[in-house]
Amino acid sequence: MGFFSNLFGLGPKVDFKAVVERGATIVDVRTPQEFATGNINGSINIPVGSLPHKLKMLNKNKPIIVYCASGSRSTSAKSFLDQQGFEEVYNAGSFHGFYRHLNG
């Protein structure tokens, strides 16, 4: 898998419904204002810039799915969480794409 494929979320397809059913924590890394305009049911809002200060809210032993508006901030969030030792982190990309995947 190439660098750009991984960077832009073009890697292996993930069955996000199955990951959610396994008890994943869904993290919306957009701003609180963006979160308030619509979000994935059951998700928590931790803006990407706040992740270093909010790590205790996340369980390293559970799958984590991150998403944002376009996939850029969620790519950064996944990379950061990977570096912090979280073992199962998935980048769902954009809010709208993730929503369609879960509800389509």
Image (cartoon, rainbow, N blue to C red):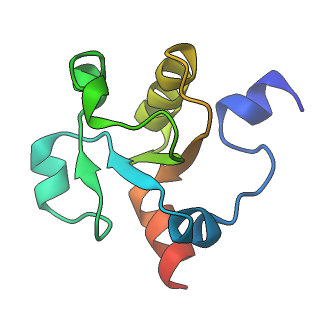
Image x and y of residue 39, in percent: 26, 63
Q: Position of residue 18 (x, y in %)?
A: 63, 70
Q: Is 41 left or right of 6, judged from the image as shown?
A: left
- Residue shown at the point (71%, 58%) measured from the top left: 14
Res 57 → quadrant:
top left
Q: Residue at 25% x, 51% y: name it.
A: 44
- Horizontal side of residue 2 vs 23, given as left or right: right
Q: Give the quadrant of residue 32.
A: top left
- Classify residue 9 as left or right of residue 65: right
- Residue at image position (32%, 66%) is 40
- Which one is in front, 10 or 51? 51
Q: Position of residue 19 (x, y in %)?
A: 59, 62
Residue at 40% from the left image edge and 58% from the top image edge: 95
Please give left or right for residue 63 compared with residue 39 in the image. right
**x and y, in percent, of residue 71 in the image:** 49, 42
How many numbered marks does the figure carry? 0
Q: To which quarter of the image does residue 85 belong?
A: top right
Picture layout, residue 38 above or below residue 50: below
